[in-house]
Image (spheres, rainbow, N blue to C red):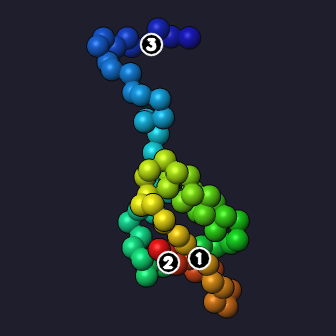
């Protein structure tokens, strides 16, 4: 291994604060808005992320989403 660059006085981030969820954009979705996902598995990932983000205080309390199949499209709506 090559010798790494050593940094002085670089503050260490608090645990968990250095990584942002790839679903952080969910906070931009307002009640009544919707978006499409490709599969039920994708919806399950989004729903799980929303639940975790709400539990961590990154989404408003009571954040709810619902899905509807329209033909072959799966649309996700923010309902609360």
Looking at the image, which residue is at 45% across and 45% down?
A: 20
Residue under numbered circle 3: 4
Assign the N terminus to one quadrant of the image.
top right
Looking at the image, which residue is at 55% across and 72% down?
A: 65
Q: Is residue 52 visible?
A: yes
- Dot in front, 1 or 3: 1
Q: Residue furthest top?
A: 3
Near-viewer residue (64 or 16): 64
- Image position of 50 with respect to 15: above or below: below
The mark found on residue 52 in the picture is: none
Near-viewer residue (70 or 79): 79
Residue under numbered circle 1: 66
Q: Residues within 10 Å of mark 3 (few under 14, many from 20)?
A: few
Q: Secondary structure at mark 3?
A: loop
Q: Residues within 10 Å of mark 2 (few under 14, many from 20)?
A: some
- Measured in 3D between alpha carbons, the distance from the residue under mark 2 to the one under mark 3, in whole angstroms, is 50 Å
Looking at the image, which residue is at 42% across and 77% down?
A: 31
Q: Secondary structure at mark 1?
A: strand
Q: Is residue 36 visible?
A: no
Tell whether label 2 touches label 1 (CB within 8 Å).
yes
């Amino acid at each position: 291994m090559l010798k790494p660059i050593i940094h002085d006085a670089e503050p260490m981030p608090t645990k968990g604060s250095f990584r942002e969820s790839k679903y952080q954009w969910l906070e931009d979705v307002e009640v009544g808005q919707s978006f499409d996902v490709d599969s039920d598995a994708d919806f399950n990932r989004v729903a799980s992320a929303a639940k975790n983000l709400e539990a961590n205080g990154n989404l408003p309390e009571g954040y709810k989403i619902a899905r509807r199949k329209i033909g072959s499209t799966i649309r996700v709506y923010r309902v609360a």
